[in-house]
Amino acid sequence: MPRLIPQHYKILIKVFEKAGLSVSGEEASHIKMNRPDLDRPIIIPKYPEVGIDIIKANLRSAKISREEYFKLLADC
């Protein structure tokens, strides 16, 4: 399996949109995305390189597996 690497925030937004999330708000340097079946929204900071720890936490919150993430990432 490929390893996770930091990604630009715009790429992550596209990945999570393909997973069914939608942008539900934006404040300063953070974007909030949500889906009705999630317990809490995910937050994506507007960084040129969003760190691996943030990506992992968002995948966990969005209930997306690593395999699904890499499939969605390949489509972007």
Image (cartoon, rainbow, N blue to C red):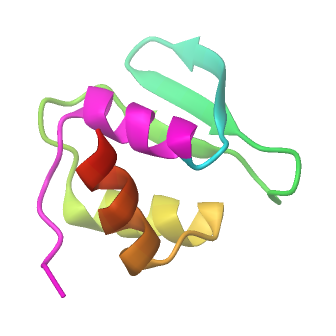
Image coords of residue 22 (percent x, y): 66, 29
Q: Is residue 38 left or right of residue 6?
A: right
Q: Position of residue 72 (x, y in %)?
A: 39, 54
Q: Is residue 57 left or right of residue 61?
A: left
In the depicted view, which residue is nearer to us: 37 or 71?
Answer: 71
Say if the magenta span includes residue 14: yes
In the orientation shown, which residue stands out farthest toward the front? 75
Question: Residue at the location (21% across, 30% down)?
Answer: 47
Residue 41 screen position, x and y as percent: 69, 45
Nearer to the camera, 41 or 28: 41
Which of the two residues, 58 or 3, is positioned nearer the viewer here? 3
Q: Position of residue 36 (x, y in %)?
A: 88, 46
The quarter of the picture where residue 33 lies is top right
Rendered-image quadrant of the N terminus: bottom left
Range drawn in magenta: 1-18
Residue at 77 percent of width and 44 percent of height: 35
**Residue located at (80% from left, 57% from top):** 38
Residue 55's quadrant in the figure?
bottom left
**In the shown orientation, is residue 1 left or right of residue 28?**
left
Q: Is residue 22 above or below residue 27?
A: below
Left or right of 76? Residue 58 is right
Residue closest to the far bottom: 1
